Image: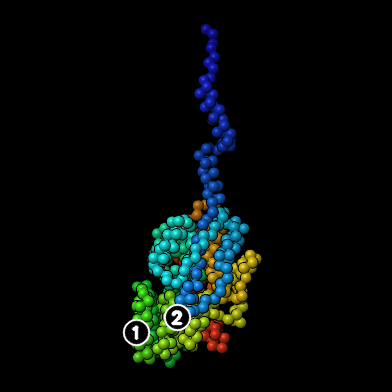
């Protein structure tokens, strides 16, 4: 019986050709699903990492208060220069960095304004990380954490270990220490400077559960260790300008009646400056114990009478009016590197006071870059946390005296220097070498 040969159908030919083309297009031995994954990974690596930056508009605050802030230059140009530098080094985990800059009006800060800012960054712009500057409202940080947005917080907002752990892995402070160890360092420094000798001590603080807990847990034992018991502790409600002023007025009356001539301020948030204003009106001039959170430079410029006899500890010399005779500008590898990168981009500064905000931006950008340097996987806050806490001394702050990151650390600064007010230069003179914070 003759053998017959069937011609392949059109459909069979089409399928065969398609299969051959598929094999040819994906490469020998590579499955289509694997190629798709590789293509997707390549596309992901080419997508920009969007990083939000807050720039404070202090003009309205200066006008309303009649106070002067140092000129920081063109902050937006400085940010773009730092971003360009990172991208020239390969970007963030191999992906280009893109700056999303929003100007935040410092005057009239409120929970509503900060919630709006948070939503603008997290919902409208969908940033991966944000550099916070001047965010003093309690609702701000939980808002970003809820949106799973990494926070590189450069605000003198007092954060303790519990705050970081509660909002982990999203909340970090590259240029500051944890506030609890700051207070321990403050009392150590005050003891060395004999601040408490022959004096009567009072404590003034912003009334929050965190500050009250800090006082009982950290300040009371440290004060007892140096033989000091405050004669009065006054907590100020800062929820409105009326309650803030009323609390200060009552505090002054109480302090004066008890002979308080040494005053510790807890919680920052400009309380020392407000108290100096109130004290001037009521002729109350105690010696203040101050930290970077109290912005000594601003107080010197605006309340020199209130600064007489002030001592404390400095974490960031740019905010503490440390004279360049004591600490030349720039000093140290972090500050020198930051200033050089900006100078190469045409951004220069008269002195450290003018560069202080730029130094903080440097720290935030550098920390993000270092965390993902050499990493080519998916970027996330969890990966950032794991890698940051392995950096050790590889992280070098531009804004603070000394820095490092280790297991359990969410704040980068780990040291301070003691300072005291010098009327002849209207500055805070350095009175000691770098001391490391102890837990």
- Distance between the alpha carbons at the discs numbered 1 and 2: 16 Å
User: Which residue sits at x=60%, y=68%?
Assistant: 338
x, y percentage for residue 424? 56, 88
Does 106 appear above or below 98? Answer: below
Which residue carries the number 2 mark? 273
Q: Position of residue 160 (x, y in %)?
A: 42, 70
Residue nearest the viewer, comparing 191 with 126: 126
Q: Nearer the viewer, residue 306 or 258?
A: 306
Specify whether 141 is left or right of 425. Answer: left
Could you classify mark 1 by the number of other residues whose Cα lies within 10 Å: few (under 14), some (14-19), or many (20 or more)? few
Q: Are marks 1 and 2 in contact (CB under 8 Å)?
A: no
Compared to residue 434, the image places residue 362 above or below, namely: above
Q: Residue at x 49, y 82 (%)?
A: 302
The residue that disc 1 covers is 250
| Secondary structure found at label 1 | helix
Q: Which quadrant does the C terminus fall into?
A: bottom left
Whether residue 23 is visible here, answered yes or no, is yes
The number of numbered discs placed on residues in the rendered structure image is: 2
Q: Give the secondary structure at mark 2.
A: helix
Q: For residue 218, what is the image quadrant?
A: bottom left
């Amino acid at each position: 019986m003759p053998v017959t040969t069937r011609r392949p159908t059109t459909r069979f030919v089409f399928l065969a050709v398609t299969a051959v083309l598929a094999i040819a297009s994906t490469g020998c031995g590579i499955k289509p699903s694997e190629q798709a994954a590789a293509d997707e990974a390549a596309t992901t690596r080419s997508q920009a990492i969007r990083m939000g930056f807050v720039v404070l508009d202090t003009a309205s605050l200066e006008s309303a208060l009649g106070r002067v802030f140092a000129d920081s230059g063109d902050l937006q140009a400085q940010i773009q220069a730092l971003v360009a530098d990172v991208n020239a080094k390969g970007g963030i985990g191999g992906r280009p960095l893109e700056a999303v800059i929003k100007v935040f009006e410092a005057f009239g800060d409120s929970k509503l304004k900060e919630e709006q800012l948070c939503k603008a960054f997290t919902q409208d712009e969908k940033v991966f990380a944000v550099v916070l500057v001047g965010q003093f409202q309690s609702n701000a940080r939980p808002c970003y954490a809820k949106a799973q947005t990494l926070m590189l917080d450069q605000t003198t907002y007092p954060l303790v270990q519990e705050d970081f752990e509660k909002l982990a892995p999203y909340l970090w402070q590259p240029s500051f220490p944890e506030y609890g160890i700051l207070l321990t360092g403050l009392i150590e420094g005050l003891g060395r400077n004999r601040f408490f000798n022959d004096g009567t001590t009072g404590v003034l603080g912003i009334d929050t559960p965190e500050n009250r807990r800090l006082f009982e847990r950290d300040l009371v034992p440290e004060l007892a260790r140096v033989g000091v018991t405050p004669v009065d502790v006054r907590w100020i409600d800062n929820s409105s300008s009326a309650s803030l002023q009323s609390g200060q007025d009552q505090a002054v009356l109480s302090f004066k009646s008890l002979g308080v001539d040494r005053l510790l301020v807890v919680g920052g948030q400009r309380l020392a400056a407000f108290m100096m204003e109130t004290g001037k009106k009521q002729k109350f001039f105690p010696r203040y114990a101050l930290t970077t959170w109290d912005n000594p430079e601003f107080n010197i410029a605006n309340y020199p009478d209130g600064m007489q006899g002030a001592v404390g500890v400095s974490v960031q010399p740019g905010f503490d009016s440390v004279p360049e005779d004591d600490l030349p500008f720039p000093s140290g590898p972090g500050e020198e590197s930051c200033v050089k990168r900006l100078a190469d981009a045409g951004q220069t500064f008269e002195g450290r006071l003018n560069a202080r905000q730029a130094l903080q931006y440097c720290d935030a950008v550098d920390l993000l870059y270092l965390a993902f340097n050499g990493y080519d996987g998916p970027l996330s806050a969890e990966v950032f946390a794991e890698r940051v806490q392995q950096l050790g001394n590889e992280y070098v702050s531009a804004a603070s005296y000394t820095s490092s990151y280790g297991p359990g650390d969410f704040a980068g600064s780990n040291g301070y220097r003691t300072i005291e007010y010098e009327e002849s230069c209207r500055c805070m003179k350095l009175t000691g070498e770098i001391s490391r914070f102890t837990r």
